[in-house]
Image: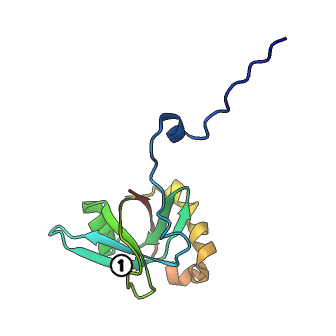
């Protein structure tokens, strides 16, 4: 009997077609805070330090939908991200990224990720106005 060896299946679609998938930059891994630069209609960048969580080569954060950063993201989903301090001082290189608002059924898995990273996110009355979860895709 002749045995024929088949090559192992590719682990992902990107490897099969040699497509480079966007990954979270190494400078952002392990950071506590992220500077999110959203853009006004005039093109002026507005920098905001945010809490974030990482999962599957994407970054996630929560906010209130009535805030200016949500309005700016609705107008222009292209943003810049960079590691920063709690006060927003950028400590590393900036990277281009795209942001999208998550639908309610997808956002249910993001809240535990943020709660696991930041103990203050577990205090419900501090975050009672947080109603929007967003996904940042680097690249």
Q: In this view, does 136 lie above or below 52?
A: above
Judging by the rendered image, the residue that carries numbered circle 1 is 48
Give the quarter of the figure containing the C terminus: bottom left
> In which image quadrant can residue 98 be found?
bottom left
| Crowd around label 1: few <14 · some 14–19 · many ≥20 (10 Å) | some
Residue sitting nearer the eye, 54 or 1: 1
Looking at this rendering, what residue extends furthest in the bottom direction? 87
The scheme the figure's colours follow is: rainbow
What residue sits 44% from the left and 85% below the top? Answer: 85
What residue sits 41% from the left and 59% below the top? Answer: 138
Looking at this rendering, what residue extends furthest in the left direction? 42
Q: Is residue 91 above or below residue 40?
A: below
What residue sits 50% from the left and 66% below the top? Answer: 26
Residue sitting nearer the eye, 28 or 100: 28
Q: Is residue 53 above or below residue 86?
A: above
Give percent across and percent down for residue 112.
61, 68
């Amino acid at each position: 009997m002749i045995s024929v060896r088949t090559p192992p299946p590719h682990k992902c679609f990107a490897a099969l077609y040699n497509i480079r998938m966007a990954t979270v930059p190494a400078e952002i891994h392990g950071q506590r805070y992220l500077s999110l630069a959203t853009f006004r209609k005039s093109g002026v960048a507005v920098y905001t330090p945010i809490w974030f969580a990482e999962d599957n080569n994407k970054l996630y954060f929560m906010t209130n939908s009535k805030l200016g950063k949500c309005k700016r993201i609705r107008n222009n989903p292209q943003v810049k991200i960079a590691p920063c301090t709690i006060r927003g001082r950028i400590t590393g290189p900036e990277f281009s990224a795209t942001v999208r608002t998550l639908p309610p059924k997808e956002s249910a898995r993001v809240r535990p990720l943020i709660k696991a990273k930041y103990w203050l996110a577990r205090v419900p009355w501090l975050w009672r106005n947080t109603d929007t979860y967003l996904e940042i895709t680097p690249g």
